[in-house]
Amino acid sequence: MNSNTKDLLIEIGTEELPPKSLRTMMENLGSNFSQKLNEAELEFESLQTFATPRRLALLIKSLAAAQPDHIVEKRGPSLKAAYDEAGQPSKAALGFMRSCGIKDLSHLEQQETEKGTWLVYRVQKSGAHLKDLITELINSSLAELPIDRRMRWGASREEFVRPVHWLVVLHGSEVLPATVLGVNAGNITSGHRFMAPGEISLDSASSYVNCLHEANVVVDFESRKQLIVDQLDDMAVHEKAEVVASPDLLDEVTSLVEWPVALLGNFDPEFLMLPEEALISAMQSHQCYFHLVDKDNRLLPKFITIANIASSNPQTVIAGNERVISPRLSDAAFFINQDKKTSLDNRLAHLKTVLFQSKLGSYHDKAERVARLAGYIADKIGADATVASRAGLLCKADLASDMVGEFPELQGIMGGYYARHDGEDSSVSDAISEHYRPVVSGGDLPDTPAGQCVAIADKIDTLTGLFGIDQPPSGSRDPFALRRQTLGIIRICVEKSLALDLRELINEAINIHDQEFDGDAVISYLIERLGVWYQDQGISFDTFSAVQQSSEKISDLCANDIRVRSLQAFRTHARAANLIAANKRIANILKKVDESTLAPVTEAIFTEDAELALFSALGKATSDLSNTENYEEKFLALADLQPAIDRYFDDVMVMADEESLRDNRLATLSQMRNLFLSVADLSVLQ
């Protein structure tokens, strides 16, 4: 590490930043700047990120003041071409000297190579200073932040997520000359807007965290979040309850405050007559409150809000929050009561005016497709097709309700409540409630058979429909969340052990769409996502590839999962390594062979005992594989071939000079490879 190192502080002070993307911006700024420093060859020890509603900041420990010095080497003409017949420097040599900025040949060195001797110019260049690089480093890091909409302010042409009001760039105690987003760097920052208003002068980069803390700003995101968690835990103990704090809500609340203070409020217990999800949504989505439940997981008429100030009169702050939440809950009660006046059945007609996708029709069209496909799936898995079809038809009806219009995150959930109110079968209402699951990665899956049918049908309908109109997801665009929906299909089929033929299902969905297109693209996309999912599950990619490249195409995801996990387990078997090596050898031999031209194996022309032994072993293995559905047993049956395979390669010359012998032996290898391929292509395993 360069001995001339100091801590570097960069702070960008702004108007209030969007809370739902604050953490992402902070993390991306850190990774961007770290990458820029590495590219610039500026050595540093570590990098720490900070963020509050009014600032993004970086603290880079022990950052070098300059790039390291380096040797610049330029090769010129060959020694032969460097002098003319009179022994004077040639035009080539003089031109090379001018390009190097020198006038004396003695400044050039000679380099011996296999092709002769060449003139070389070497000079040590001093590395650029940090102060000359810092503006570009910051600006380029900010330009690459994932900001959906950038804004301008005042007469400036600069663009950022929010207007920028101050900039701190300190290397040690030295202010580096930088201009970022139209603001010149200094050492002046701001404390808490209300508890420590006014400017704060920073003496050094290393004093940043403590100075801000004295000004009532907990600048470290994780420290601030932990303070909130600790206060929530203390209140939960005091109230003999449990505070429900989702990670997303915790991050959002942490992004809204600089000095968190937890306060307990109450709401009218009469509101508990409403669906709990409606109350929770009103508290979380609109007010960023944390709700409390009792030991039986029942909602309590209490909430915790995180204030951004340590008030001298907290009861006034609590009363204000209680006044705010009451009308929100009253609105929810009003919407629900209004919605109950119209049945889901009668709301179906309203769905004709709600567009799903311009080329795929309305949500009414989608509901009819989902109903048909859900009934089809139910027949295949032994569920009640009547229940599944009814739930599929009604599953989108709550989109036309006032409650979902105000609280979109409750779609499906409110439909389930309204279905129960309408007197629908409980299996229908449960399926409607569950059909959006999983709503997040790793989220809960639908529990009921009908819910699983409708959930798969809804997702398959969207997937096939969008591929049918040539609108698959791209690297940057996935407006219908097809990646998440595809993962949902995979998880439901695998984790709920549903024996569904995926290829038949997709063809049925295409028929219901009344479209004519090849479903292979849908299958390929789904299998691609399946491979990614297995990697997330800790299954190596080549294990999945070995199954994918077998002759038994992936169709039943549940059966495929058994095969994949059996192969992953078999790889630890003592005989696995040799069997994999043998498969690679067989695949390499057959690589240049047109196997379709090979005749069946002719036992009569065997010349070696090893040929007969392997042929007999293949017959037994073929029988063993056909007599079991257990993939662990299949892999062990293949492993039993190993002694015969080893003997075959020791005793038999496969590529014999005599054509009939050679072709017969290649046919034996082909038969063996096809037997392995019926389970997995072991040759792709590492």
Image (spheres, rainbow, N blue to C red):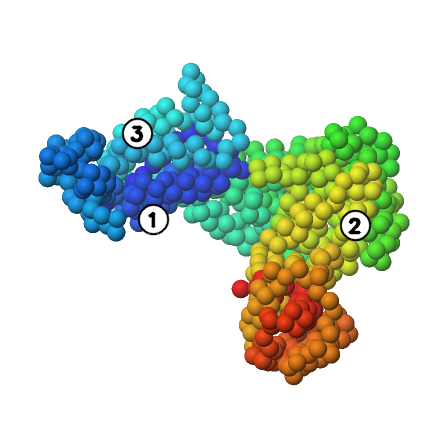
The residue identified by callout 1 is: 46
Q: Amino acid at mark 2?
A: Leu
At 46% from the left and 49% from the top, the residue drawn is 226
Q: Along the polypeptide, which appears first: circle 2 or circle 1?
A: 1
Q: Could you say which disc has been placed on residue 111 in the image? A: none
What's the CA distance linking mark 2 and mark 1? 52 Å
Q: Along the polypeptide, which appears first: circle 3 or circle 2?
A: 3
Q: Could you say which disc has been placed on residue 505 in the image? A: 2
Instruction: Between residue 193 and residue 423, name the one nearer to us.
Output: 423
**Drawn side of residue 149 relative to residue 560, left or right:** left
Q: Quadrant of residue 656?
A: bottom right
Q: Along the polypeptide, which appears first: circle 3 or circle 1?
A: 1
Q: Secondary structure at mark 3?
A: loop
**Drawn side of residue 258 relative to residue 597, left or right:** left
Q: Secondary structure at mark 2?
A: helix
Where is residue 289 shown, x and y percent of the image? 58, 41
Q: Quadrant of residue 265?
A: top right
The residue identified by callout 3 is: 178
- How busy is the neighbourhood of tag 2: few (under 14 within 10 Å), some, or many (20 plus)? some
Q: Amino acid at mark 3?
A: Ala
Q: In the figure, 287 relative to 670: above or below?
A: above
**Badge 2 vs badge 1, beta-carbon distance below 8 Å:** no
What's the CA distance linking mark 3 and mark 1? 22 Å
Instruction: Between residue 426 and residue 557, name the one nearer to us.
Output: 557
- How busy is the neighbourhood of tag 1: few (under 14 within 10 Å), some, or many (20 plus)? few
At 68% from the left and 54% from the top, the residue drawn is 491
At 82% from the left and 34% from the top, the residue drawn is 364
At 29% from the left and 40% from the top, the residue drawn is 8
Q: Secondary structure at mark 1?
A: strand
**Drawn side of residue 398 relative to residue 137, left or right:** right
Q: Amino acid at mark 1?
A: Ser
Q: Quadrant of residue 217?
A: top left
